Image: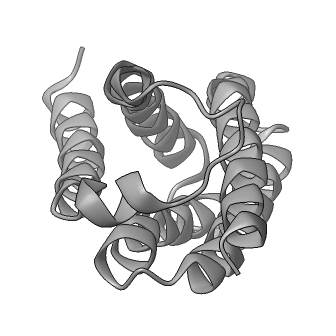
């Protein structure tokens, strides 16, 4: 693999790790434990392995989009989804704003799907890597909405 590919992959991996680290600064804690949650809420231990795999897929997808499309709409959407992704934990766990987190996660889902559609013609693997991410964020959106409904 050429050095330039290694460097650009390292940049996308680093940005993804940065977003994960930002999000990890705001953990569930006592406040979350006191919230009413639907019976179908996954166990807490499931989130770390799922997000670890998703973040790897997000990084690879961004790198593939960059290689296929350069700096354009697809790559810009990738950056937007990373920002929205990092913001959710701050809104939900940091500010305890379930409502704003719900707006953010629905926006995130729209950006994820839009990115996949935009990147599909030039980098199908990049789009396919976002399919599990879209399903997980869709499920998380429903969970966020249910928690908001149960606690307002």
Residue 151 sits above or below residue 19 on the image: below
- Pick the quarter of the image with the N terminus: top left
Left or right: 116 as drawn, with respect to 77? right
Residue 54 sits above or below residue 25 on the image: above
Measured as percent of width and height from the top left, residue 131 is found at 74, 29
Residue 102 lies in what quarter of the image? bottom right
Which residue is at 43% across, 79% downward? Answer: 91
Measured as percent of width and height from the top left, residue 26 is found at 23, 64
Which residue is at 37% across, 52% downward? Answer: 33
- Pick the quarter of the image with the C terminus: bottom right
- Of 107 and 144, the residue lying toward us: 144
- Of 146 and 136, the residue lying toward us: 146
Residue 130 seen by the camera: yes
Measured as percent of width and height from the top left, residue 106 is found at 75, 67
Left or right: 87 as drawn, with respect to 140? left
Left or right: 43 as drawn, with respect to 115? left
């Amino acid at each position: 693999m050429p050095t330039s590919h290694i460097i650009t992959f390292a940049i996308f991996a680093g940005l993804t790790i940065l977003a994960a680290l930002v999000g990890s600064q705001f953990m569930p804690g006592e406040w979350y434990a006191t919230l009413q949650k639907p019976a179908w809420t996954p166990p807490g231990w499931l989130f770390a392995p799922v997000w670890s795999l998703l973040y790897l897929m997000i990084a690879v997808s961004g790198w593939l989009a960059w290689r296929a499309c350069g700096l354009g709409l697809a790559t810009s959407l990738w950056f937007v989804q990373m920002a929205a992704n990092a913001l959710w934990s701050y809104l939900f766990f940091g500010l305890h704003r379930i409502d704003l987190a719900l707006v953010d996660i629905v926006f995130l889902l729209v950006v994820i799907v839009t990115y996949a559609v935009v990147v599909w013609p030039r980098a199908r693997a990049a789009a396919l890597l976002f399919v599990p991410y879209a399903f997980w964020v869709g499920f998380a959106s429903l969970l966020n909405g249910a928690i908001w409904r149960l606690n307002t």
